[in-house]
Amino acid sequence: MYNNRPIGIFDSGIGGTSIWAAIHQLLPNEKTIYLADSKNAPYGQKSKAEIIELSKKNTQFLLDMDCKLIVVACNTATTNAIQELREKYKVPFIGIEPAIKPAATNSKTQTIGILATKGTLNSELFHKTTEMYQDTKIIEQVGHGLVQLIENGEMYSHEMTQLLHSYLTPMIEANIDYLVLGCSHYPYLIPQIKKILPSNIHIIDSGEAVAKQTQNVLKEKIGFSSNEKKETIFYTNSNPKVLSEILGKKYNVIEKDF
């Protein structure tokens, strides 16, 4: 069974391109449409109702582009809106949430750290997940300001370095041995995070797991593309320069109001 329609991916901004990259690497023949709602970033500071409405708007945009599957490449949108999206639309959805299970299961110190947005850490889904690991001490930290700095093209700024030190130092002192990145923007900060963390602390993000789940859903329910042409379209409603810099000159970014 073949299905040449595109995979749709949306995020509150450019961060979900880390998820797109994992999907593209695993499924290079699939056409993908990426939607960066940078005008409304960050989602983490918004109310649940606002996040749901923005997620519906993004979904409708991708459905209008005839997408066969939608990846919610945003932790905050997944934890706050994916249930409502699945109830409203017939298209399959794949979400992204902090990879607590592998961290808690493999931790030797029984202490893990989670760096995420306020919207993710306050969500009902996140609380249900953490309750499953009562034997593990979980150090939660809201990454105030990190998404905005990335969206503004200030990833390597002095302010970013200071914020990362202030967020990670208490986790190091608490003896974590796993750091879970609970926002799709944060993998872009891994090189800087590694400079701060001791080498024994493992960093986990969700990109590979989401890509494998996408592959499974295509195989079992929807069908792979039969095309050999690797086509990707990127849309953003704000600051296309930053998205272009993240992607490199190989891909075109279309600025569109939505």
Image (cartoon, rainbow, N blue to C red):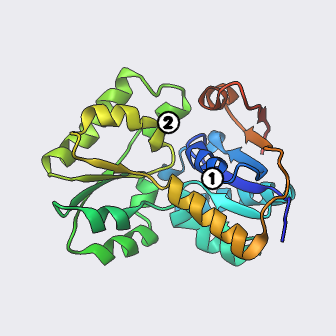
Q: Is residue 49 visible?
A: no
Residue type at mark 2? Answer: Gln
Tell me which residue sits at (30%, 29%) in the image.
162
Q: CA distance from mark 2 to mark 1?
A: 29 Å
Across and down, in percent, residue 160 comes to 38, 29
Task: Judge whether 36 appears above or below 158 on screen.
Answer: below
Q: Which residue position is annotated with label 2?
A: 148
- Quarter where residue 193 is shown: top left
Q: Which residue position is annotated with label 1?
A: 26
Q: Is residue 129 left or right of residue 168?
A: right
Q: Nearer the viewer, residue 211 or 142?
A: 211
Q: Is residue 59 left or right of residue 126?
A: right
Q: Nearer the viewer, mark 2 or mark 1?
A: 1
- Quarter where residue 93 is shown: bottom right
Which quarter of the image is occupied by the N terminus? bottom right
Across and down, in percent, residue 19 comes to 58, 50
Q: Which of the two discs, 2 and 1, labels the residue nearer the N terminus?
A: 1
Q: Is residue 237 left or right of residue 125?
A: right
Q: Nearer the viewer, residue 51 or 247?
A: 247
Across and down, in percent, residue 58 comes to 72, 55
Residue type at mark 1? Answer: Leu
Label 2 environment density (alpha carbons within 10 Å; few <14, some 14–19, many ≥20): some
Task: Judge whether 91 appears above or below 157 on screen.
Answer: below
Task: Judge whether 130 appears above or below 21 on screen.
Answer: below
Tell me which residue sits at (74%, 75%) in the image.
221
